[in-house]
Amino acid sequence: MRAKAKPSIVLRAGLVAGILAFAASAAAADWVEPTFNPPVGSRWIIQRDLAEQTDDNGTLSASTLKITSLLTIEAKTADGFRVTYARTASSYEGDPEDAATSRPVLAALQGLVYRVVTDAAGKPLRVENLDEVIATQKKMVEALAAAGKDPQIQAAIVKSLGDMAGVDAARAAELYLDELPNLAVGQNTGLKIGEVRRSAPTQHNMFGLSAFLKTTTLSIASVDAASGEVHLTLDEITDPDSMRAMLVGLYEKTRDSDPAEADRNINQVKSMALSQETRTEFDVVDGMTRRTRSLSTTSRDLAGNKFVDTTRTSVSVSPAP
């Protein structure tokens, strides 16, 4: 009688691969996302470093903005948290003229304590001390206008002061808290392993100009059940027409000081090819975003004259000593 043939190496390898795939699938099905639940009274240092490089038709320039902030978890509510947020240090390095403009702007916001209500994921919902925040933001804009040298831009900034008065508590939470809203993107996502979430949010600005429209894709890159770490990826593409509308709105604000120049700039904007893409990676530990890294590229092209702005942002969140 002939002996039974032993399974081939290829067959054995296939069986092993199948078993591993099944085990991975079972682990993915069993995995549960850790929830955002920092202890009441805990204090967190948020360090944001932003490095920007601009290529203006072959002329290169670079700058670095650093902001250190303190986030304190004041209380837990039925629907989320009460927190305070304040910048504790900031610096700007780059073109000397830009640096001179930035110093009074950064100084105006230093030490302002925002009192914020968040949802269960830590996303800011509203600023409770809105009057104090708006008053400080107006001082910042006035400092920016005073430091500027372009009369048209100065006029646009001053006109925007009136628009800021209409910012409500919810919009202030979206606009004035630096990286805090973005950190919440990685928390309590509800995503399953292998799931991809697509959305089309809007991004507002503090000067009452048209909002950017975006398409976003959020997914889990990897998980480590043992350590509690989750790594996510967020891709964002900005709608060019919404970018164009924002720029047109900016130049409309300069019409009172120089109508002809405003019309010239608006006509150029309408002819521009515009694009903006951003990829952000999130490292989430025990339900709290602890690190993000993002790369954003914005380009404008008008009749072969190209402007490309590349921004790399890194954010870390660590317990305060």
Image (tube, rainbow, N blue to C red):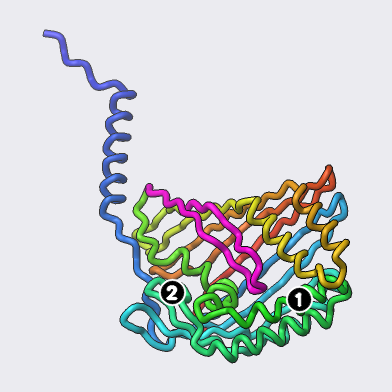
Q: Is residue 160 left or right of residue 20?
A: right
User: Residue at left 48%, top 76%?
Assistant: 124
Which region is colored magenta?
A: 194-217
Q: Amino acid at mark 2?
A: Gly
Distance of mark 2 from mark 1, alpha carbons? 32 Å
Name the secondary structure under disc 1: helix
Vertical order, 213 against 285 (above or below): above
User: Residue at left 56%, top 57%?
Assistant: 280
Q: Quadrant of residue 37?
A: bottom left
- Judging by the rendered image, the residue that carries numbered circle 2 is 122
List x then y, in percent, for residue 160: 71, 76
Q: Is residue 221 visible?
A: no
- Judging by the rendered image, the residue that carries numbered circle 1 is 157
Give the camera-side residue of 142 and 166: 166
Q: Amino acid at mark 1?
A: Ile
Q: Residue furthest top?
A: 1
